[in-house]
Amino acid sequence: MTEHELKEAGPKRLASALMEKGALTSDWLPAFEAVPRHLFVPDTIWPGRAGMNRQDDRVTRAEQPEVWWEAVYRDAPITTQWDGGQYTGPKKGRTPTSSNSMPTMVFSMLGALSVESGHEVLEIGTGTGWDAGLLSHRLGSDRVVSVEVDPATAENARTRLNLAGFHPLVHVGDGAAGYPERAPYSRVIATCSVGSVPPAWRAQTRPGGVIVTPWGPTYGGEAIARLTVAEDGSASGPFVGSSAFMRISAQRKHFPPTRAFLDSEEWPGAGVRTETSLSPDDVGDWVHMFAIGVQVPDLFCRVEWGDGGAYRLWLMDTGVTSWATADYKKGRERFPVVQSGPRLLWDELEAAWRWWDDQGRPGFERFGLTVDNDGERVWLDSPDNLAPGRPAT
C-alpha cells in the first residue's frame, strides 16, 4: 500500500468504525472529515502495544511513519506527554500528563454536549487541540475557549489549530478556575477527570446549560457525567458511560505511603484476622470501584503481587487511621482478611459491594450526580434515591 493509499484509507476506516459504534453521528461527520486527527497528533507518541506489532512503546513519525499512521487512525487513546514533558524516552515515563483521547470517547462526549449553533463552549484541557478544532469547525472559532495548564502543550495546540485554519482562544491557566472573562457559557466540557466538580464551572454556565465531565471517586472507577445547570446554580444529571481520563492537575491524587499505616511494625502487626467469602477478584472491576468509592469516599487501594497470579489487596483511608488486606489466590473459596485501626475497611468495602449487588448490579448509566453549594451526591435511578455512604474525612 502506498503512503497516499494509507492516508486515504485511515480516516475512512475510522469514520466507518465510529459510526457503526454509534459514537460518530451524522451531525459531527463533517467536522471529523474537516479536522483530521493526524493534524493534532505530535510526531512522537506512546500509543501502547495493544493490537500493534512493535518493539517499543514510543513511536516516532520519522522512523516509523506507517506505524505512526496506524496508531493515529485506530480507535485508541494516544499518550503524547509523560511527566510534564520531562520524559521523552523509548519506553514509558512515570505519569502520563497529556494525550489525544480515544476517538469513540471524543465523539461520545461531544454528542452528550448537544451543541447547537450560537452556543459558546468552554473546554477544560486543550491537550493536542483536536477537540477544540472539532468544536471550532462546528460552532466557529470565536465561540470556543480552551484552557490548558501546561504552557508548552497550549502553545503546541495553538500552533496546530492555527495551521488547520482555526483560531479559538487557548488560555494558559488552571482549568478548575475556568475562564470567567468570556462567561457565561452554554456548554462546558472537560477532557480531564475530576473527583469534585469545580464551583467555577457551574458559576460560568448559563441556567439550562450543560457540563460534560469525567467524574470518579478516590477509590477508582470513573464515568462521564452530563449535568444540567439550574437557575439556582446547582447542577444535576446522569452518568452516560464509563471513562478513564487523567485527573485535572489541581485534583491529582497523592496518597500516603503504606509505611505510614504500619509505623515500625511488619504486616500483620496488631491486625485482626478474619476470612471472607467475597473474593478480592470480584470487587476490582471499574464499576465495582466506582460503586464502592462513592460510598466510602476516603478509601484507596494498592495491590501487592505474588506468584502465579496471587495478590494482596491493601485498603487504606486518606486520613491514615486504618488499613486492611485481603489475600487472593486462584481456587480458594474463602480469603484471608486482616484489619487494623478504628475502622474495619474490608467490612466497609464489602458492605458497599453488597449494596451494589442488591440493587441488581447497576452499570454506570443508572447512576447520576447532583452538585450544589452543599457538596456532591451520587444517586441511583433518580436524584431522591441517594447512594448510601459516609462523608469524606
Image: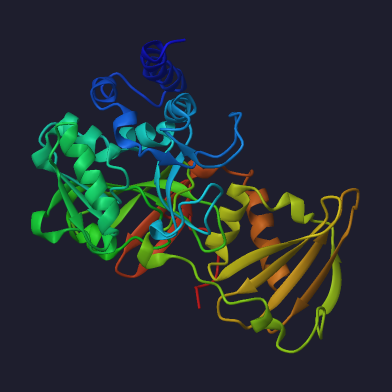
Left or right of 7? Residue 385 is right
Q: In the rendered image, is residue 210 in sight?
A: no
Of residues 48 and 301, the one nearer the viewer is 48
Q: What residue lies at 37% left-to-right and 63% top-to-bottom?
A: 249
Of residues 41 and 331, the one nearer the viewer is 41
Horizontal and vertical percent for residue 131?
A: 28, 38
Left or right of 60? Residue 186 is left
Please state the total of marks drawn on the protein image.
0
Q: In the rendered image, is residue 10 in sight?
A: yes
Coloring applied to the structure? rainbow
Residue at the bottom extreme? 264
Left or right of 230? Residue 217 is right
Q: What residue lies at 13% left-to-right and 60% top-to-bottom?
A: 180
Determine which quarter of the picture holds residue 372. bottom left
Of residues 165 and 147, the one nearer the viewer is 165
Determine which quarter of the picture holds residue 118. top left
Determine which quarter of the picture holds residue 12. top left
Horizontal and vertical percent for residue 203?
A: 19, 61
Horizontal and vertical percent for residue 198?
A: 30, 63
Q: What residue lies at 23% left-to-right and 23% top-to-bottom?
A: 34
Q: Is residue 374 above or below residue 186?
A: below
Horizontal and vertical percent for residue 154?
A: 25, 52
Q: In this view, does 139 lie above or below 378?
A: above
Q: In this view, does 92 lie above or below 116?
A: below
Q: In this view, does 318 lie above or below 64?
A: below
Q: What residue lies at 44% left-to-right and 65% top-to-bottom?
A: 252
